[in-house]
Image (spheres, helix red, strand yellow):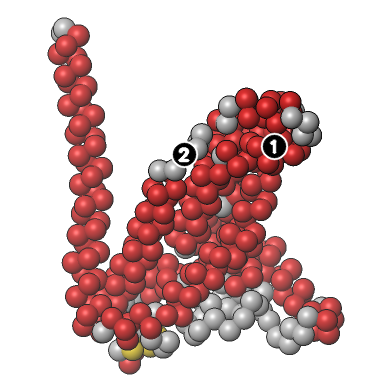
Amino acid sequence: MTSRLKEGVMQGVFTLCACVSILAVALICIFLFANGVPTLFKIGPLKFLLGTTWKPGNDIFGILPMILGSIYVTAGAILVGVPIGLLTAIYMSKFASPRINKVMLPAVQLLAGIPSVVYGFFGMIVLVPAVQAMVKSPFFKTVLHVKSGKGMSLFTAAVLLGIMILPTIITVSKTSLDAVPDSYYEGSLALGATHERSVFYAVLPAAKSGVLSAVILGIGRAIGETMAVVMVAGNQTWMPKGLFQGLRTMTSNIVIEMGYAADLHREALIATGVVLFVFILLINLCFSLVKGGKDYA
């Protein structure tokens, strides 16, 4: 077999793999929109998206509590995960010795490989009792005026998701920081800046779009997470009432009820999947716009 023939065969294999990937995405889109959009209009777009009551037994399908639940949990996860992940990436890239990095890098990779259900068990066994005890403490009741709260809550889910998105933020941010040319750092030192100021005021701004990409990918991971959130969020279908009260996200709603749903109830869950899919598309669009900027990621 000549080299040109081998090249043609491999090109055909690569093209076939690309076509299969595109076909899979297209089939998912067709299934979701073909089944979900008609249901959306059958229920009523405003009634479905802005309704505050979810009672499938009475054919009442309002997913605003789940939309807000997903947004709140994701926002809380970003508040927890971004500062810790970014500072860890800066430390690993510009401050840690090679010996420390040999320990930290496998630890971060291991954190990325832990299954969601294991994170959920950790949340149930460790975080939920800790938050429950924290809410019942005199400090929370007298100083912060938290009169009531639960271990399975928005706060617990946000902390757990913040831990889960750490590997994504750390690895992408570290890669972006490592890709910045040394001339940025050396030039800052030559102008009299300290090591810390050179890193934070010269290297970090040069990698800003890579860091933003890490944050956007973390948002995508957080908003699409299901199993861990189901195990620690409480899963009440009412409007979110507070930081230490239970809620339900869109992904949790689909997983919990799809097993026994039928007819319009099942179609409403698929329509919920369409709304979630649109959220993910918007996140990917933001990622593409950010990556279109000038950076060294």
Q: Quadrant of residue 60?
A: bottom left
Left or right of residue 194: residue 61 = left
Residue placed most toward the observer, 14 or 76: 76
Q: Is residue 137 above or below residue 13?
A: below
Q: Mark 1 highlights which residue?
A: 199
Task: List the single residue furthest toward the front.
Answer: 191
Residues 78 and 32: in front is: 78
Q: Residue at x 38, y 83 (%)?
A: 50
Percent across and percent down for residue 222 are: 51, 59
* Residue sitting farthest toward the bottom: 58
- Answer with the quarter of the image where residue 262 lies: bottom left
Residue 38: percent from the left, percent from the top?
19, 75
Judged from the image, the secondary structure of the residue bearing numbered disc 2 is loop
**Dot 2: few (<14), some (14–19), or many (≥20) neighbours within 10 Å?**
few
Question: On the image, which quarter does residue 255 sit in?
Answer: bottom left
**Can you see residue 51?**
yes
How far is mark 2 from mark 1, CA to CA? 19 Å
Query: Looking at the image, do the residues carrying marks 2 and 1 touch, with CB atoms under 8 Å apart?
Result: no
Residue 149 left/right relative to 119? right
Which residue sits at x=25%, y=42%? 21
Question: Which element is circle 1 on?
Answer: helix
Q: Residue 24's x, y, as percent?
A: 24, 48
> Pointer 1: residues within 10 angstroms few (<14), some, or many (20+)?
many
- Return the x and y of residue 171 as percentages of the image width and height: 57, 40
Q: Nearer the viewer, residue 177 or 217?
A: 177
Query: For this view, does 23 lie left or right of residue 250?
Result: left
Q: Which residue is mark 2?
A: 294
Q: Residue at x 70, y 85 (%)?
A: 148
Which quadrant is the N terminus positioned in?
top left
> Label 1 is placed on what type of residue?
Val
- Between 154 and 292, the residue placed more toward the observer is 292
Reply above or below: 7 against 178. Answer: above
